[in-house]
Image (cartoon, rainbow, N blue to C red):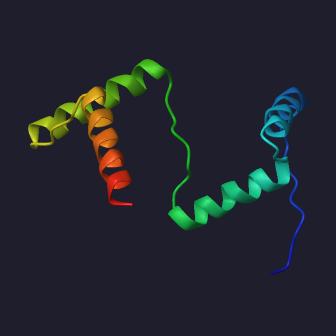
Amino acid sequence: MASINMSIRTDSELKAQAEQVLSQLGMNMTGTINMFLQQIVRDRAVPLSLSLSSEQSLYADLLRARVDRDHGVEYLPADSVLERMERAIEGADGDA
């Protein structure tokens, strides 16, 4: 596959801050942009959650949970899920 150079304009401080975060993750800007583009192609969507505030995101999550409950989806408390996982692991260890 042939490679091309792309040019984009962005704020220099924003770029420096992003490069610092990426560096801490062992990544670089080119690789990250390529992953972003590959995900766009794979999912045929832009992989961003756009929101004006986290409150709106929380509200949307609560509305979605209410709709799920209205349609019969039942959620388990986290403690119950962890207990079931521990029992499953213990059962798997006994089978080995």
User: Which residue lies at the image location 18% right of the left edge and 31% below the top edge?
Assistant: 66
Q: Is residue 82 above or below residue 31?
A: above
Q: On the rendered image, what quadrant is the C terminus found in?
A: bottom left
User: Which residue lies at the image location 34% right of the left edge and 54% below the top edge?
Assistant: 92
Nearer the observer, 66 or 51: 66
Q: Is residue 28 above or below residue 66?
A: below
User: Which residue lies at the image location 10% right of the left edge and 37% below the top edge?
Assistant: 70
The reply, left or right, for residue 20 in relation to residue 49 is right
Nearer the observer, 62 or 78: 78
Q: Is residue 58 above or below residue 84?
A: above
The reply, left or right, for residue 26 in relation to residue 47 is right
The reply, left or right, for residue 60 in relation to residue 35 is left
Residue 1: which quarter of the image?
A: bottom right
Nearer the observer, 34 or 8: 34
User: Which residue lies at the image location 47% right of the left edge and 21% below the top edge?
Assistant: 54
Q: Residue furthest top?
A: 55
Q: Is residue 8 above or below residue 65?
A: below
Q: Residue furthest bottom?
A: 1
Residue 74 horizontal/vertical position (percent)? 15, 38
Residue 60 horizontal/vertical position (percent)? 33, 30
Residue 2: which quarter of the image?
A: bottom right
Residue 16 horizontal/vertical position (percent)? 89, 31
* Number of marks in picture: 0
Residue 44 horizontal/vertical position (percent)? 52, 63
